[in-house]
């Protein structure tokens, strides 16, 4: 592109999407996230960067998602999606941060520098998919992203309001047409279609009940389930709550993050004892389950539970079809409940690894297995399958005996129902429902597999959260000096005690996590 036309681009940026704040913003665990009114220039610049990234990837499609997930309505955010539907490659996070913080005057020269550094051929075509969540600030930001793409002569395609995982899925399909059709309908066809196919093979039996209540967090996930609900032909009876009407506010006292962190039931949901409820987050990439008992006590079945449920079922199917040579493993973070890790290692006898917080870290570790299951305790996770795993199962489906073929077919549908690009509340919901149905199990049956250790998570505001540095997958602190020794002193007095602190990558706070064998311990050690 000749320099004169680039100059027009930057004049346009100054005019239409000026940088109005000097507050430094960083590409964190899940992209840029802050108050929506501070983001317009950042999103425009991410439009420019997505075009550069697409050209570095030979014109393959890149995604831009406008969302602040579980944050409250005044916030918003933006993140880039790489061609395989994965989170942006880590080395580009610094590039994104540089581009977001430079002054309007220096935008032109920095962009030029970056184009050189990454060796982008600016004569190539570039394609960018743009999606957004339901926030009232999202359309304006999505338009800024599209302006950025057009400015560098890329081709934007706007998907409107979609869940984050739907956009990841579409990006992947656009670059790999064997995965599916890159549209919202293509997504339903693959995920929901596979669910219905499996249901034809499994009869509803035992304690399983086809009614599922859903807390939609007043976000996009509930809205999409409302579309899906009409196509389920009675295979699953969804009762949807918190769909954004009746004055319900996005993520306010509802949704997966609220339920997990506050360990309380969301507002806006009718509570019937022992009825299982699935709670989604604002952009539909996280899910946790819960129920209330006769005493109105809430029982939470979080991401660790979902991971163990899926891992045990997949192991069972692998054994049934004689594909035991495939290596299956589970990936967690330090926030995983100690009881779940013990159950996975001692009962399921499945290898488990612990990595740093953030889905990208879990995803990459999971890819090391033939079948890698990863979940954050907060309900963000999925399963990834290697080509070797898929081919082995297809071969069994062709050559195996009747029993083996039956299990291989169920597993192949199970794979099809999985959004392998990223954690996906809708896909995970269908996976969980499939396992419970196959086992004739209700939510209390699922819960009995192990008992969670009581735990608490707190947020602490400090002057400089980056003063805290960690090691060993964030489980130990190396700075400031003396902090880890003090934690150790407290923890060693507690049976099954474990605690750690780490700076958040999405909020300006430090997170403190502690667990022990009884809830009371918390009061004895009042200063936790
Ligand atoms: C303890 C916790 O839940 N942390 C969350 C949170 O990250 P922090 O870096 O802890 O702020 O947001 C991430 C993005 O949604 C999510 O991946 C992660 O699990
Ligand atoms: Mg989310």
Image: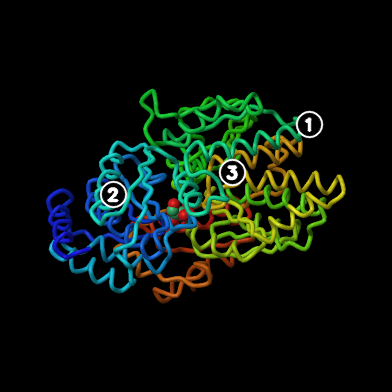
Which x, y percent locates residue 258? 46, 42
Please tell me which residue lies in front, 442 or 222: 222
Q: Is residue 336 left or right of residue 3?
A: right
The numbered disc on residue 206 is 1
From mark 2 to mark 3, how far is it between C-alphas? 29 Å
Quadrant of ligand 1: it is bottom left
Tell me which label, 2 or 3, sits earlier in the chain: 2
How would you rate the neighbour count of disc 2 (Cα within 10 Å): few for under 14, some for 14-19, many for 20 or more? many
The numbered disc on residue 440 is none
Please identify the quadrant where the N terminus is shown: bottom left
Which x, y percent locates residue 234? 65, 24
Tell me which label, 2 or 1, sits earlier in the chain: 2
User: Which quadrant of the structure image shows residue 495?
Assistant: bottom right
Element carrying mark 2: helix
How would you rate the neighbour count of disc 3 (Cα within 10 Å): few for under 14, some for 14-19, many for 20 or more? many
Please tell me which residue lies in front, 11 or 272: 11
Tell me which label, 1 or 3, sits earlier in the chain: 1
Element carrying mark 1: loop
How would you rate the neighbour count of disc 1 (Cα within 10 Å): few for under 14, some for 14-19, many for 20 or more? few
Residue mark closest to the camera, 1 vs 3:
3
Q: Is residue 255 left or right of residue 350?
A: left
Q: Which residue was labeled with disc 2? A: 145
From mark 1 to mark 3, how far is it between C-alphas? 22 Å
Q: Is residue 435 left or right of residue 331?
A: right
Q: Which residue was labeled with disc 3? A: 428
């Amino acid at each position: 592109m000749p320099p004169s036309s680039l100059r027009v681009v930057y004049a346009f940026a100054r005019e239409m999407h000026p940088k109005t704040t000097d507050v430094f913003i960083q590409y964190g665990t899940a992209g840029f996230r802050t108050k929506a009114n501070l983001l317009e220039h950042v999103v425009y610049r991410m439009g420019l960067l997505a075009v550069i990234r697409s050209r570095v990837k030979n014109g393959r499609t890149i995604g831009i998602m406008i969302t602040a997930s579980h944050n409250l309505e005044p916030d918003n955010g933006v993140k880039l999606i790489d061609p395989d539907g994965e989170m942006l490659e880590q080395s580009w996070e610094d590039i994104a941060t540089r581009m977001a913080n430079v002054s309007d005057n220096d935008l032109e020269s920095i962009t030029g520098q970056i184009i050189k550094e990454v060796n982008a051929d600016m004569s190539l075509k570039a394609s960018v998919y743009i999606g957004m969540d339901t926030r009232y600030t999202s359309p304006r930001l999505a338009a800024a992203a599209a302006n950025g793409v057009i400015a560098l002569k890329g081709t934007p395609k706007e998907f409107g309001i979609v869940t984050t995982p739907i956009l990841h899925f579409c990006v992947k399909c656009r670059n790999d047409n064997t995965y599916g059709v890159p549209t919202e309908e293509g997504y339903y066809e693959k995920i929901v279609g596979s669910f219905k196919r499996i249901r034809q093979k499994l009869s509803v039996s035992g304690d399983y009940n086809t009614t599922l209540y859903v807390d939609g967090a007043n976000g996009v996930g509930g809205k999409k389930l409302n579309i899906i609900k009409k196509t389920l032909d009675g295979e699953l009876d969804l009762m949807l709550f918190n769909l954004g009407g009746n004055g319900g506010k996005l993520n306010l006292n509802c949704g997966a993050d609220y339920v997990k962190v506050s360990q309380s039931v969301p507002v806006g949901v009718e509570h019937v004892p022992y009825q299982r409820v699935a709670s989604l987050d604002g952009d539909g990439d996280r899910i946790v389950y819960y129920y209330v008992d006769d005493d109105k006590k809430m029982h939470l079945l979080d991401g660790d539970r979902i991971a163990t449920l899926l891992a045990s079922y997949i192991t069972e199917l692998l054994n049934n079809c004689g594909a035991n040579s495939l290596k299956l493993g589970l990936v967690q973070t330090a926030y995983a409940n100690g009881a779940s890790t013990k159950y996975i290692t001692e009962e399921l006898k499945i290898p488990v690894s612990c990595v740093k917080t953030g889905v990208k870290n879990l995803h990459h570790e999971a890819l090391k297995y033939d079948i890698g299951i990863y979940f954050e305790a907060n309900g963000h996770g999925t399963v990834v399958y290697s080509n070797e795993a898929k081919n082995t199962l297809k071969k069994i489906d062709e050559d195996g005996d009747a029993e083996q073929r039956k299990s291989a077919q169920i597993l192949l549908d199970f794979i099809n129902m999985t959004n392998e690009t990223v954690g996906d509340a809708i896909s995970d919901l269908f996976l969980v429902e499939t396992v419970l149905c196959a086992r004739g199990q209700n939510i209390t049956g699922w819960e009995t597999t192990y008992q969670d250790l009581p735990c608490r998570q707190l947020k602490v505001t400090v002057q400089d959260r980056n003063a805290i540095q960690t090691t060993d997958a964030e489980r130990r602190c190396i700075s400031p000096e003396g902090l880890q020794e003090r934690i150790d002193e407290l923890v060693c007095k507690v049976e099954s005690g474990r605690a750690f602190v780490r700076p958040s990558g999405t909020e300006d706070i430090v997170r403190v996590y502690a667990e022990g064998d009884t809830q009371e311990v918390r009061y004895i050690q009042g200063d936790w």
